[in-house]
Image (spheres, rainbow, N blue to C red):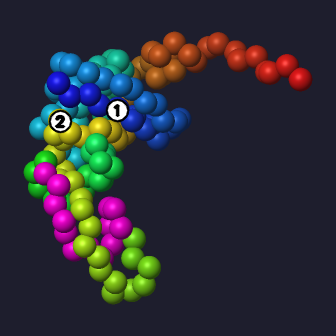
Amino acid sequence: MADFKIVVSDPKTKTYQFDITGAEANQFIGRSIGQTVDGATVGLDGYTLTITGGTDNSGFVMSPTLPGPRRQKVLIANGVGYSAVAKGVRRRKFLRGSEVAPDITQINTKVTGYSDKAIEEILGGGSEEVEAPAE
């Protein structure tokens, strides 16, 4: 069974993190960066999520340019996973392919389709006031 941390970034408000296991997690396996997923898998009914990246259990990032789910050592000049310090510098780095596999730990997504209810309302934390700490 796969366990994932799903990071949902809402461009309008903020970022939320969900832990999913079992059948919900299996819906992500085999999907690639750029594909859409129903938000109901993480409890956000009516929302549409787009996979934007992620990391595996060793911390290697998913690259949208590499096909498949495996880890590869590639020569890169700039892009996901490496930023060159000078022009023309290239480096051989391990990157993960763009397909979600069971050894992926974190999946980054962004909201692309909205529901009529706000995420705060769905999660139940939007209308409550937080008391200031006592001084």
At a point 24% along the width and 40% down the height, the residue shown is: 104
Q: Is residue 135 above or below residue 79?
A: above
- Seen at 44% across and 79% down, the residue is 85
Q: Is residue 38 in view from this perspective?
A: no
Quarter placement of the C terminus: top right
Left/right of residue 27 with respect to residue 10 in the rendered view: left
Q: Please give the range of residues in magenta.
A: 70-82
Specify the amino acid type for callout 2: Pro
Examine the structure image and report whether residue 11 is included in the region drawn in magenta.
no
In space, the residues marked 2 and 1 are separated at their CA atoms by 13 Å
Quadrant of residue 110 within the rendered picture: top left
- Kindly give the residue lying farthest to the right in the view shown: 135
Q: Earlier in the sequence, mark 2 or mark 1?
A: 1
| Quadrant, the N terminus | top left
Q: Answer yes or no: is residue 58 visible.
A: yes
Q: What amino acid does circle 1 point to?
A: Ile
Q: x%, y% of residue 132? A: 79, 21
- 126 lies left or right of 109: right
The x, y position of residue 81, in whole percent, is 34, 62
Between 126 and 134, the one lying in front of the other is 134
The residue tagged 2 is 102
Q: Which residue is mark 1?
A: 6
